[in-house]
């Protein structure tokens, strides 16, 4: 039967059609997989017993410690967004740089980078800046296309600057691909890739992307000054204390989370819990909890974290002496002070209707991500059973140009799919098929992961289904048209490609920091 030979290709095409039809993604993925599993079994192209491995795959996803960090980082981002910390940052940075030509654009990029490193949620950042920064730029006289492009692009930095949901999912997929490649090479004492390595690898490229955006804004300000006039001097620059109050709390949270991961003090999941607690305390302070209580709670938790690491206490041991019990009592008091600050913050967030919305958003986003990952396991199992893995390997190995040609083809395919599919779908469906082959061809897994991450970030900007475009369309003033938004992001899509080329030409940008830290 001729059709049976091409069921794997038909399956991928059917998935694209099901997703583009508007049907819920997780159901579209699983429904396509079940339909083609039946077709493969009926035509003799697939051994149906292969589905017996499905339960093990689902159990593996649900018990994956790396993925536990996702709801914690989402909680951190949602609470920071709902507590209006982003508004303070935007207002302060806008007044700091606004009187420079292109200064408002630079402030939007810098705030996008700060929010990316502290929240990691694209939708929240784009909507916040679309409602606050975009009207300000339009009043100042910015070209509507440029203003729209800046807001959309700065909002997507949350996907490449750690911590981000994309990098967590990507690290899990790339680690599995790296292990699979080593098994195929005959190695049974395999190395793995951690979330920390991917975070470290993405940090310098993320800042490189920010620098490329700022250079573009400065260059455009020189070439087309009418596109970005300076803000009126009447708004006034903020004082040093006001800038510090707006910037230092999120920067402190970023240092606490990334510093804990990169220094090896905490795993990504533990660091994510630190970020969530830090966001709750920051939001509590923003909502009116006593600054003294918040300060005492933060100090107590920091002292407890360092002291418990340097001088751990194990009171369950039979030889625990008076000193150990005294130290344990001190640790208990510190924990109670920290708990008092956390509970006071939670109580105030509950009273201001911040907490309920944050929990609901966290559950919604987490459920969507995990449903997609679980259903992608079903899809990939059937796709492999239909011979799709061998076909993908054959296509990549037959590309002209060897490993470089194969990587160019894979990156082009990811870029094109980004016009139609979400980054989660591309990551959990396509990458497990192509990443092991690319690693076997000799590409460094961390460098490869960062290239793919920047490529996937571009999917938020590419019409017609770029999520940033939808977010801004909902938050932008009525005078901004959809066409202006599409025109505005076009130069930044090209800048994304430039960034990929820079990381490709200088691999050390992605591999140096992981090599030093790990």
Image (cartoon, rainbow, N blue to C red):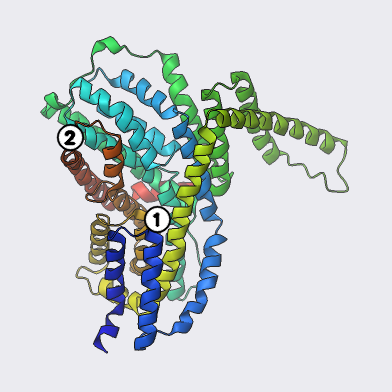
Q: Position of residue 113 (x, y in %)?
A: 36, 35
Callout 2: helix, strand or loop?
Answer: helix
Q: Is residue 101 above or below residue 399?
A: above
Callout 1: helix, strand or loop?
Answer: helix
Rendered residue at 16%/41% (across/down): 483
Closer-to-camera residue (48/156): 48
Q: Position of residue 386 (x, y in %)?
A: 36, 80
Closer-to-camera residue (370/437): 370
Name the mark nearer the viewer: 2 or 1: 2
Question: How far separated are the C-alphas under marks 2 and 1?
Answer: 35 Å
Q: Position of residue 88 (x, y in %)?
A: 41, 23
- Whether pointer 2 and pointer 1 mark residues with C-beta atoms closer than 8 Å, the reply is no
Closer-to-camera residue (238/324): 238
Closer-to-camera residue (489/311): 489
In the picture, the disc for residue 454 is none
Camera sees residue 452: yes
Rendered residue at 88%/46% (across/down): 319
Q: Residues within 10 Å of mark 2 (few under 14, many from 20)?
A: many
**Quadrant of the rendered structure where residue 380 is?**
bottom left
Question: Dot 1 corresponds to which residue?
Answer: 446
Camera sees residue 185: no
Left or right of residue 417: residue 380: right
Question: Dot 2 corresponds to which residue?
Answer: 145
Q: Is residue 226 above or below residue 315?
A: above
**Quadrant of the rendered structure where residue 103 is?**
top left
């Amino acid at each position: 039967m001729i059709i049976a030979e091409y069921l794997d290709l038909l399956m991928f095409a059917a998935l694209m059609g099901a997703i583009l039809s508007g049907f819920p993604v997780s159901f579209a993925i699983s429904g396509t997989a079940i339909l083609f599993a039946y077709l493969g079994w009926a035509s003799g192209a697939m051994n149906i017993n292969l589905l017996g491995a499905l339960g093990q795959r689902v159990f593996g996803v649900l018990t994956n410690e790396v993925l536990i960090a996702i709801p914690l980082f989402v909680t951190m981002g949602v609470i920071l967004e709902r507590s209006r910390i982003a508004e303070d940052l935007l207002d302060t940075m806008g007044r700091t740089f606004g009187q420079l030509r292109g200064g408002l654009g630079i402030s939007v990029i810098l705030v996008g980078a700060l929010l990316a490193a502290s929240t990691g949620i694209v939708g929240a950042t784009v909507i916040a800046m679309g409602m606050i920064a975009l009207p300000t730029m339009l009043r100042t006289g910015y070209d509507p296309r440029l203003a729209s492009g800046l807001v959309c692009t700065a909002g997507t930095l949350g996907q490449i600057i750690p911590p981000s949901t994309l990098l967590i999912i990507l690290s899990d997929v790339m680690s599995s691909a790296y292990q699979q490649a080593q098994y195929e090479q005959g190695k049974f004492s395999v190395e793995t890739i951690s979330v920390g390595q991917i975070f470290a690898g993405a940090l310098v490229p993320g800042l490189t992307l920010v620098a490329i955006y700022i250079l573009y804004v400065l260059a455009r300000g020189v070439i087309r000054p009418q596109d970005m006039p300076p803000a009126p001097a009447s708004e006034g620059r903020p004082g040093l204390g006001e800038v510090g109050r707006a910037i230092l709390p999120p920067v402190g949270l970023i240092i606490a989370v990334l510093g804990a991961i990169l220094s090896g003090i905490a795993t990504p999941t533990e660091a994510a819990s630190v970020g969530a607690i830090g966001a709750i305390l920051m939001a509590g302070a923003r909502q009116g909890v006593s600054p003294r209580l918040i300060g005492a709670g933060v100090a107590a938790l920091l002292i407890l974290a360092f002291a418990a690491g340097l001088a751990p206490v194990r009171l369950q041991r039979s030889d625990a002496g008076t000193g150990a019990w005294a130290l344990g009592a001190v640790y208990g008091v510190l924990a109670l002070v920290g708990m008092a600050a956390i509970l006071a913050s939670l109580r105030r967030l509950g009273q201001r209707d911040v907490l309920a919305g944050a929990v609901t958003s966290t559950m919604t986003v987490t459920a969507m991500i995990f449903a997609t990952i679980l259903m992608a396991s079903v899809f990939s199992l059937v796709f492999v059973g239909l011979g799709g893995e061998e076909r993908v390997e054959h296509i990549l190995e037959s590309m002209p140009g060897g490993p470089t040609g194969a990587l160019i083809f894979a990156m082009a395919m990811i870029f094109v799919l980004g016009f139609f599919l979400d980054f989660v779908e591309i990551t959990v469906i396509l990458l497990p098929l192509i990443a092991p082959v690319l690693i076997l061809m000799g590409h460094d897994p961390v460098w490869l992961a960062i290239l793919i991450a920047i490529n996937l970030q571009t999917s938020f900007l590419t019409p017609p289904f770029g999520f940033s475009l939808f977010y801004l369309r909902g938050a932008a003033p009525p005078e901004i048209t959809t066409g202006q938004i599409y025109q505005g992001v076009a130069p930044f899509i090209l800048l994304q490609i430039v960034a990929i080329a820079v990381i490709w030409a200088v691999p050390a940008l992605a591999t140096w920091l992981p090599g030093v830290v790990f």
